[in-house]
Image: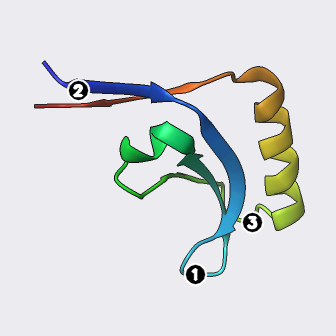
């Protein structure tokens, strides 16, 4: 059975190594141990601008209340 971690995440727009926008789920507070200092990156469709990425992040924040990370054995 895998480990499951549920906690508070901050959704932000970051720039990837190629200079393109990505959405990043960053654990906050006591949740930061879940990903050992890392974050979950959501890759966006080619051509998505930073302004569009920000709008997507704001829309997601209206509807999502938490995130769960489940790791395999």
**For the residue labelled by badge 3, is the local secondary structure a helix, a strand or a loop?**
loop
Residue 48 visible in the shown view? yes
3 relative to 57, above or below: above
Residue that numbered label 2 is attached to? 3
- Please state if 16 lies on the left or on the right of 10 as rendered: left
- Please state if 7 lies on the left or on the right of 55 as rendered: left
The residue positioned 82% from the left and 65% from the top of the image is 49
- Please state if 48 lies on the left or on the right of 68 as rendered: right
If you read the primary sequence from the N terminus, does the residue marked by circle 1 or circle 2 appear first? 2
Q: Residue furthest top?
A: 1
Residue 57: assigned label: none
Q: Quadrant of residue 63?
A: top right
Q: Are marks 3 and 1 in contact (CB under 8 Å)?
A: no
**For the residue labelled by badge 2, is the local secondary structure a helix, a strand or a loop?**
strand
Q: Residues within 10 Å of mark 2 (few under 14, many from 20)?
A: few
Q: Position of residue 23 (x, y in %)?
A: 65, 53
The residue positioned 17% from the left and 31% from the top of the image is 72
If you read the primary sequence from the N terminus, does the residue marked by circle 3 or circle 1 appear first? 1
**For the residue labelled by badge 1, is the local secondary structure a helix, a strand or a loop?**
loop
Q: Are marks 3 and 2 in contact (CB under 8 Å)?
A: no
Q: CA distance from mark 3 to mark 1?
A: 12 Å
If you read the primary sequence from the N terminus, does the residue marked by circle 3 or circle 2 appear first? 2
Residue 21 visible in the shown view? no
**Given this view, does label 1 or label 2 mark the residue nearer the observer?**
2
46 relative to 58, above or below: below
**Quarter containing the N terminus:** top left
Q: Position of residue 7 (x, y in %)?
A: 51, 29
Q: Residues within 10 Å of mark 3 (few under 14, many from 20)?
A: few
Q: Residue furthest bottom?
A: 18
Residue that numbered label 3 is attached to? 47
Residue that numbered label 1 is attached to? 18
């Amino acid at each position: 059975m895998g480990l499951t971690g549920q906690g508070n995440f901050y959704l932000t727009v970051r720039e990837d190594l190629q200079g393109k926008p990505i959405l990043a789920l960053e654990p906050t507070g006591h949740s930061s141990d879940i990903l050992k200092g890392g974050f979950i990156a959501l890759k966006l469709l080619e051509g998505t601008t930073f302004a569009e990425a920000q709008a997507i992040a704001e829309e997601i924040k209206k509807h999502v209340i938490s995130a769960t990370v489940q790791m395999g054995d």
